[in-house]
């Protein structure tokens, strides 16, 4: 897969998507229309940039896998919407740790 169709943004009920290990050089900004998506796997694609609209528009996104791409964590920290995404990501992991501790004490 070399290109994601622009119409991917119409899949409003999508909660998880795995586009890993393709040949995507860039992402359509219409991915930012996926307001319910929580997990977006984009590893090993050769991505050179990451559209700000995705972090701003995907308000439920808490897991983003970009390893194996040219986009660095430093690049992402400069993208508008990073702080909000990072808060959701940290909150998700905090809840998992909390549950694990509570679940093992009984």
Image: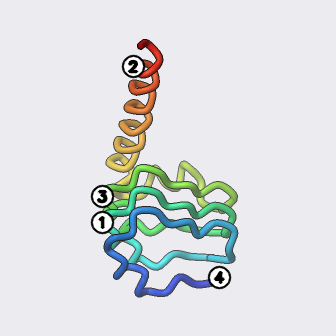
Q: Which residue is mark 1?
A: 35
Q: Sequence-wise, which precedes: disc 4 or disc 1? A: 4
Q: Sequence-wise, which precedes: disc 3 or disc 4? A: 4
Assess whether mark 2 and mark 1 are in contact (beta carbons under 8 angstroms). Answer: no
Point out which mark residue 12 bears: none
Most extreme residue toward the front is: 106
Q: Which residue is located at x 43 percent, y 22 percent?
A: 103
Place of residue 9 in the rendered image (x, y in percent of width and height, measured from the top left) = 37, 79
Q: CA distance from mark 4 to mark 1?
A: 23 Å
Q: CA distance from mark 1 to mark 2?
A: 31 Å
Assess whether mark 1 and mark 3 are in contact (beta carbons under 8 angstroms). Answer: yes
**Crowdedness of circle 2 by 10 Å Cα count: few (<14), some, many (20+)?**
few
Q: Which residue is mark 2?
A: 102
Asked if 63 appears above or below 4 in the picture, the reply is above
Tell me: 29 left or right of 73. Answer: left
Q: CA distance from mark 4 to mark 2?
A: 43 Å
Q: Which residue is located at x 54 percent, y 49 percent?
A: 74
Quarter of the rendering occupied by the N terminus: bottom right
**Crowdedness of circle 3 by 10 Å Cα count: few (<14), some, many (20+)?**
some
Quarter of the rendering occupied by the C terminus: top left
Q: Which residue is mark 3?
A: 59
Tell me: 27 left or right of 24. Answer: left
Q: Which residue is mark 4?
A: 1
Asked if 88 appears above or below 48 in the picture, the reply is above
SS assignment at label 2? helix
Tell me: 92 left or right of 2. Answer: left
């Amino acid at each position: 897969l070399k290109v994601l169709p622009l119409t991917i943004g119409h899949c409003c009920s999508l909660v998880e998507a795995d586009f890993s290990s393709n040949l995507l050089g860039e992402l359509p900004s219409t991915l930012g229309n996926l307001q319910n998506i929580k997990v977006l796997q984009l590893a090993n694609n050769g991505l050179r940039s990451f559209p700000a609209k995705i972090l701003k528009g995907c308000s439920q996104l808490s897991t983003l896998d970009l390893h194996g791409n040219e986009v660095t964590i430093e690049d992402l920290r400069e993208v508008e919407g990073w702080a909000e995404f990072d808060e959701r990501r940290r909150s998700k992991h905090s809840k998992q740790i909390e549950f694990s501790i509570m679940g093992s004490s009984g």
